[in-house]
Each structure stands twice: as structure tokens, then as C-alpha cells.
Image: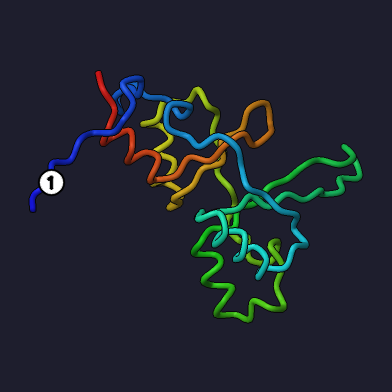
Amino acid sequence: MTTKTQPYGSYLTPCFEHATVVDAMRTGVVSCAADVPARTVAQIMATHHIHSVVVEGVDQDPVRGERLTWAVVSDMDLLRGARAGIDEMTAGDIAVTEPVTVEPSLPLDDAVRLMAEHDTAHLIVADRGRPVGILSTLDVASVVAWGRG
């Protein structure tokens, strides 16, 4: 039996050359506190079928007061944690990669360049300093596959 595949992309998705981060990103973030057990982070990823979790924590800055900081636990961070004894670790312990943030209006080509430069598959999309979404390599692939004119 032969089946024909139909393109399922939106007619509203622009082509890669004209797309911005907001055209490709997933809105909303799954997050946890830095002190959440690493095993719980694994359960979050497995439950939601996602490859990254934003880790939120508050750094005390004696000059400026409190400021929000983020990190990302990627699937690869989780694998490294699993090999190092995950039961004694927290989300903050395994979130070892500095997160790369972009604004929603950034051209998608620039975001892809940042992914390559930082060797990361996920960017945090931030608007006015707050995470509002995630851009992954799979999101970019969707634009490449389905984007139009």
C-alpha cells in the first residue's frame, strides 16, 4: 500500500529567509526551581515529552538586591547527571550550560547562527527579561519544511 504525504504546515508560516523567532518558537516554558531533585526534572521531561526545562532561581546581589536568573537542563545535561549519580543532584546541579536567550523579533537565521555558535539545540525566548518560550532545532526544522513565500 502506498500513501501520499500531504504538507501540514500553516499557510501563515513564512519561509526560513523571512521568518523570525516568534514564527517558529513554542510559547510557554516548563520550569522548575533550582533545588528540585534531578530525578523530578527527568520525570517532568518524560511526562511532557520535552527535551529541556528552564531552571529558575534567585541570586542574591548585595548591590542590586535580588535578580532572577535562569539555566536550562537539556536532555544531554540529564544524561550526564544520570551517569554521575542523579539521586544526589538537583536541577541546579545538572543545569551546567549557560542559557542562550533571544528576543521574539530576532530573525530566525540569526537564532540558528547562535545555536551553532553555542552548540545548543534550545534557545530561551525572552521578552522584557522574562522567558516566554523555547526555540528548538525541531521548531526550526518545521519552518524549513513548511514555510512559504
Q: Residue at x 56, y 67 (%)?
A: 78
Q: Position of residue 143 (x, y in %)?
A: 33, 33
The residue at 31%/31% (across/down) is: 9
Quadrant where the C terminus lies?
A: top left
The answer to whether residue 145 is left or right of residue 72 is left
Q: Is residue 61 above or below residue 90?
A: above
Q: Quadrant of residue 131?
A: top right
Residue sitting at x 33%, y 26%: 10
Compared to residue 68, the image places residue 14 above or below, namely: above
Q: Position of residue 18 (x, y in %)?
A: 33, 21
Where residue 95 sits in the image (x, y, percent)?
A: 63, 60
Q: Is residue 131 left or right of residue 59?
A: left
Q: 92 or 110, which lies in front?
A: 92
Residue 89 x, y percent position in the rendering: 70, 73
The residue pinned by badge 1 equals 3
Amino acid type, residue under disc 1 in the picture: Thr
